[in-house]
Image (spheres, helix red, strand yellow):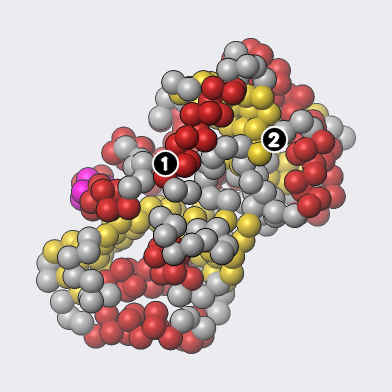
Amino acid sequence: MEVKEIKDKKTWEDFLLKCEEKTFLQSWNWGEFQKRMGNKIWRLSIFENGGDPISTALVVKIVAKRGKFLFLPHGPVIKSQISNLKSQILEVFLERLKEIAKEEKVDFIRVSPIWERNKENIEIFKKLGFREGPIHMHPEETWQLDIKKPEEELLLQMRKTTRYLIRKAQKNKDIEISKSQDLKDIEIFENLYLTTVKRQHFVPFSLDYLKNELLAFKGDNQISIFLGKYKEEIVCGGIFVFWQNLAFYHHGASLLKYPKIPVSYLLQWEAIKEAKRRDCEFFNFWGIAPEKSPPSHPWAGLTLFKMGFGGERIKYVKTQDLPLSKKYWLNFLIEKIRKKKRRL
């Protein structure tokens, strides 16, 4: 097995088309987004016997006050037919990652795997010296809906209340859902987003982050901003990524001004229909609260909302860290405190 850096977008995206376990965090355009944010990246791929690639990993160098590290967001991605070689593939990647880590003088390597959370996959990381990270960077539990069925069937498999609220919203002439790729609408979304932040007490992404995400995916028509209005007032919004055969509800925001008006339910349904029009097969609602979480969990209400549309829970192996210097433990302590403060 040989690790090479990929410089060609088509080679990268064509390989990912052959993979089942993946998210847009390993897409070519997410790499472009990272570059827009000022982060150094490597697009690595493993080749076997000089043939086609069998695995890829987008690697991002994160520079934070608490330390520097190499990060693999929802990677590595492995060709479905050779999932039995996971351990060997990760080991080969790790050799190259340690070389990069030495050159870049980073304190640790962090992997947020896209692998199913089971004993076998957890053991692969343990045997290579990884330990469970103190905090997650991207969802470790997500809610996903198979949208290959006709719209009426999708409605019938929803929670009764969700279906009722969608139909109620459809009949309300004061409710309007719009979609765009306009930077001005990102600013409108951010106003809603900051209101949501104050209410739910989470750390927000910056306006630059949201704008750069839009710009990175807009060129390939892989992103949309959905805004929901009630009586001409914008009361909710969402940013959705449509990549390959998958759709992702990446960011959401809402006001509580009209709690009995189900604008957010119709917005989500319109996004699902848009995903179907784009020939997506699955709709990923992104992060949800861990199973058996108490009602006080910050994501409890949002999780109930997402699950109402039908689908299934998917659990990924938890974030894995490979410490490379003593500075890692300072980062570990800071993130442990942050997690406690956020009640996650």
* Mark 1 residue crowding within 10 angstroms, few (<14) / some (14–19) / many (20+): few
- Examine the residues drawn in magenta and state their main secondary structure: helix
Q: Secondary structure at mark 2?
A: strand
Quadrant assignment, res 50: top right
| Quadrant occupied by the N terminus | top right
* Left or right: 196, with 330 as reference point: left
The residue tagged with tag 1: helix, strand or loop?
helix
**Residue 21's quadrant in the figure?**
bottom right
Residue type, numbered disc 2? Arg
Mark count: 2
Mark nearer the viewer, 2 or 1: 1
- For label 2, the residue is 131
Confirm whether the magenta stretch covers residue 187. yes
Of the image marks 2 and 1, the number of the one nearer the N terminus:
2
Name the residue located 53 percent from the left edge and 50 percent from the top edge: 139
Task: Residue 252: give x, y in percent of width and height.
Answer: 35, 56
Task: Say above or below: 72 vs 280.
Answer: above
* Crowd tier of the residue under label 2, counting other residues whose Cα lies within 10 Å: few below 14, some 14–19, many 20 or above: some
Span highlighted in magenta in the image: 186-191
Q: Nearer the viewer, residue 161 or 344?
A: 344
Q: Give percent across and percent down for residue 201.
A: 33, 47
Does residue 34 appear in this view? yes
> Does residue 98 appear to the left or right of 186 in the view shown?
right
Q: What residue would you read off at disc 1?
A: 341
Residue displayed at 48% across by 22% down: 66
